[in-house]
Amino acid sequence: MNLRFPLLLCVLTVTVVMLPQSLFGEEDHSAVLGSFLKQHCVTCHGIKSPKGEFRVDDLASESFDAADVKRWQLILEIVDVGEMPPPNRPQPDTQQLERFQAAITAHLESINQANGAWEAQLPKYANRVDHDALFSGEHKGPAFTPARAWRINGNTYSQLMKDLELGFDFVVPLQANEEGFKDYAQLYADEATIRTMMQNAKRVADSILFGRLHSPRGAATRNPNAKAGRSGSRYREIKEFLAIETLPTDSQLKTVTRFAFRLLLNREPLEEELNRYVSGLLLPNIRAAENADGLRGLFVAILISPEFVFRAEIGMGESLPDGRRMLSPNELAYALSFTLHDHPMKSLLLAANEGKLKTRADVEREFRALVDDPNLYRGRSSVAGKEFVWQSGKDHRFGGYAKPRLLRFFQEYLGYTSAPNVFKDDTRHGGKHDPRQIVADADWTILHILAEDQNVLGELLTTDRFAVREARRKKKKSLKPGESDDPTIQSYQAVYNLEQPSDLGRGRERIAMPEGQRVGMLTHPAWLVAHSTNFHTDPVRRGKWIMQSLLGYPVLELPIAVQAQLPDWHDKTIRERYSVVQADECWRCHKKMNPLGNPFEAYDDFGRWRDHHLVGSDGNIVEAEFEQLFRQNPEHVRAAEPKLPVDTTGELYGTGDPELDGPVTDAADLMQRLAKSDRVRQVFHRHVFRFWMGRNETLSDSPTLIAMDEAYVQSGGSFKETLVALVTSDSFLYRK
Amino acid sequence: MINRRQLMRTIGKHAGACSLTPFLMQMQSQAMASDDESKRPKRFVFVIRSNGVLTREILPEGMEDLVKERPHASTLKAFQEVSLADKKMPVGMKAIEPFKEKVTLIQGLSGKMINGNHEGGFGALGAYNGWSTPRDETIDWALARHLGGVIPHLGFTMESFGKSVTYPKLSASGPRKPLPYYADPLLAYTDLFGTIATGGKAKASVEIDGNILDFMVDDVKRYQGAFSSEEREKLGYYLEGFSTLRERQAKLRSMSEALRNAAPELQDHFTSEIETERVRAHFDLAASSLIAGLTNVCTIRCEHLGLRLTGLGLGARTVHHIGHMLENKNDGNTGGLDFEGDAAHWGEFKVRQVVMDFHMQQIARLYTKLKEVPEGNGSMADNTVVVYLSDHGDRHHSNYDLWPMTILGDAGGALRTGRYIQYPGYQNRGNQTLGNFYLSLLHAAGDKRESFGYPDLTSPDHIDQKTPLTEWMA
């Protein structure tokens, strides 16, 4: 174990002496390593023309040389994802493989170079759990989640800060996962987090104590001591406390502390806590300054306290004989609230208090009520009344939906919200590239699919109806109905190749795309742009996404030795330029990605459908290095014609279904086949599990995943039923 | 548990001979080390701009023919070295002309191990491919870690008004550990120099903060007790955060005299709504922090692609727009790239010159302040190195094969200065990488490690990426 916390170890007076790994079985380890390498690796990776120019015969197995660390890490990685030994060679059995990996890990640990437990919990490693084993039905659990402290996420924090009247110009200092789902329970808070949270907390405390600052601009807003322009506290308890001019009595101190707990933590303090906060914090603060300053310090402390920053799921409910403990009613109220919302739901906290949140049946009842709650349907017009309706009228990108976590799952799963981060020049677009609009369209398309709640995954993968923002008319009178004089809207709608973008009706409804051009969210401009580069399409990232998120295969991280660079062949398409990866050492991985991503060449890097590449009068492909070409030869570009037909063929592999695997003709063919795959559906449910459980699945979660999958299939593809199966599962309810 | 006040008392009693307080020893050693030149603390300031630094922007006057405008790296063939003694500094660098015997201009460095998008991200200072996620420590942290200091690394960044602390993708203390930057000069002032406050209210506020931190250390430990070792380890980051803050506050209090002497004067530019004014404040803070002995390494990011440089009279153009002026030849500068007539239609080179001139003025101000503080036989400036570079190589859309560098200072004589050095370009024999460059800084600081960053594996084998720039090292 990598000792990351020397300080922590000092203060906690850890009594367990950690013996260096090397005292145990070093001989064993080196023997394991030596014999495995000899048996499975050296034949190809020996001194004589080693494959991929990667040698292992000169690796010392007794102890690791620092210079060899990178090689050992790569071996561990490549064996872990099942890339080596290659399929046409004798395979080690599971036990042999595990011993080999354990031996490498032990050696790496001994020199502090191993990935710790923390890394292993990252979502990017989740696919390493054997898919077939997960759904075989052989693993019966018992399912549970380790007791944990789930750090608050950026959305919840923002919501709480806004609820407490902080305003909008604050920094959210909470880092999210870089790859995969952003909010995982293993995330931590550190010094930088605390520093910024403390600044925010001081401003929140001022709002609570003295009222919100009126002047929204100017230096005064950032001075934590500024009281000018404040309207006074809106809380009676605070006003009463601030009116005290002498040293407050014990009971006054306790009353205001109780109030602070209720306001910020939604609970009464325990007697012991109350005494500690009063005598250890509030009273000393008041003695150091004034009553108001002391109280401000109390609020600041609670706003950075562990209970505010982390959500404990210890399992304070009933224990089972096997050691698992159910979440307590209070823990359940929080856990259920955060399945759909960014803040704790009063109704659930009340249910917990009234003893209505104890059993699995209680959980199902309350969750269904939460999902179906018509009071949360603040949607309007066209789809109001259906389930999963959203709240309109607010900017949805900032969490204005009534059930924000639902849409967020799809945003993070599909990854299309990063489209605005891929900078593209309007000069190449011909009009205005408006990635925020197309992301909004993707959001609304998904919300429609959720509102219908039938065959949800199938619709996601194959729908040819997208929501498109209506054409707005600025000068209503001078235009005919349906005409738009807003060039921004017109040019963004052109992305969909809609001949009559004005026929969109009033609301943002799903409308049919031109025939044969769009098949599911992977052909949505938002997804295509998000998975493209500044100037080009990106078949590799697209193929990688399908491989990881639909087919559920682990991906080898880009080996350090690889420099991902495409040759500057101006007269070749991206697909042709990628032919360089067919070299042996590249193709081993790229053969799994490029054939899956190539069918999307039917769209340019703005996500516009095409059947030909534009070729300039000098014979160069316009999309390739457009910028340079345009600068040097604008006339060649202007005279470009759609000459070269787009090659959209590809190949599907790994669904485990011989009917589906094989060459595909285009994106429609690929997506239709993926939508039929059992494996793809199961992998989708693995992702649902990760997002809502905030952790990677393990084999003991197998019963939960199977139950989710069955609930979905039996309900005709209801996403709601999948979620019900999840929240009533042992994985959700039990801790250990 | 010893609470903070008790701790302060302990420090008060034993200051000077106390083995419990390593930071005091460090401060003391800083104060006493003045006799031994080699042990004197080195200081590094990284000044980062956007849009690339053009190769021509670092060419001394009269040497414009040496490198083609926006050259292909391969056209830089032979090694060149020219003394600056009889040259005039490039047109954007007039502000540092008085210090030109301490200036080095380095052309021809490659950095192909880096990849990014308008910014090299953490890679620019880390010499690795890490646009969005830090793969390893960056050079500023590597130096900071080696040089120590109450706050080893201080980052300041230009940001939109109202932001307090941000994490620009620039500096990192290790894999997936980005470093925070102050975006708000007033907040930075309060954090760094707030302990010198003598007024009742401000003093009480500092004391209350101390109480809160003390209380939280205790609270987190109680909370930790409910969990298994793995969760406890995770919560350890959080606990460590409180402990570090508490220790830092104690350290700041103990050095209040140094802080009081060095603190910048709080003026309007600290709270100005004009971005470039706040950048000026950041330079003030950096200079004061170095002089007070708070830190030995600062990174100042003085541009941000999304913001405007209205304070420099550049109108409504964003920084990003400036980078695109070359691509969009007819976009607002009908007079061509060199057009210097009507300010509204300045060409890109003129606009860039205004920007660079502003940056150089700030560097000159900082350097001058350090020159005024005696140290050993000279001044603090003698032991300081200011590195001016872009996080995106030599242009707005760079392919990372050229990274023009401007360096002011010789790190106490460890570097040879007063010269323009041009290395052969990427792939040519004799080319040097950013890794070599950063390694030189480390060696100059006394950290004699063998390599820095990740090697550029596309460079031919004859390029040795494990040596410092021998032509630059003294």
Image: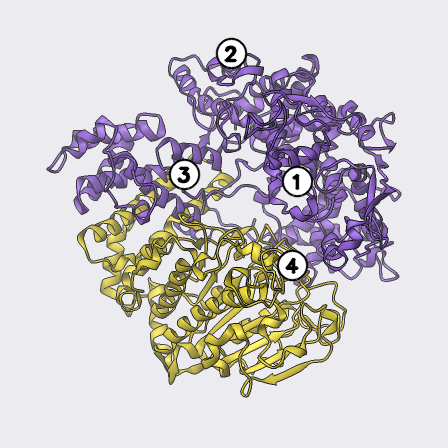
Chain colours: A purple, B yellow
Along the viewing direction, whichever of B4 and A654 lies nearer the viewer: A654
Same subunit, tags 4 and 1: no
- As measured in the structure, the alpha-carbon distance from the residue carrying label 4 to the one carrying label 2 is 65 Å
The residue drawn where x is 76% and y is 38% is A603
Which residue is denoted by mark 4 in the rendering?
B329
Which residue is denoted by mark 2 in the rendering?
A365
- As measured in the structure, the alpha-carbon distance from the residue carrying label 2 to the one carrying label 1 is 39 Å
Which residue is denoted by mark 3 in the rendering?
A168
- Between disc 3 and disc 4, the foreground one is 4
Q: Amino acid at mark 3?
A: Phe
Q: Residues within 10 Å of mark 2 (few under 14, many from 20)?
A: some
- Between disc 4 and disc 1, the foreground one is 4
Which residue is denoted by mark 1 in the rendering?
A530
Q: Chain of mark 1?
A: A
Eyeballing the image, is A415 above or below A321?
A: below
Residue A307, quarter of the rendered image = top left
Upstream in sequence: badge 3 or badge 2? 3
Q: Amino acid at mark 2?
A: Arg
Q: Chain of mark 3?
A: A
- As measured in the structure, the alpha-carbon distance from the residue carrying label 3 to the one carrying label 2 is 36 Å
User: Is A655 displayed left or right of B379 in the figure?
Assistant: right
User: Is B170 displayed left or right of A31 in the figure?
Assistant: left
Q: Chain of mark 2?
A: A
Circle 3 SS class: loop
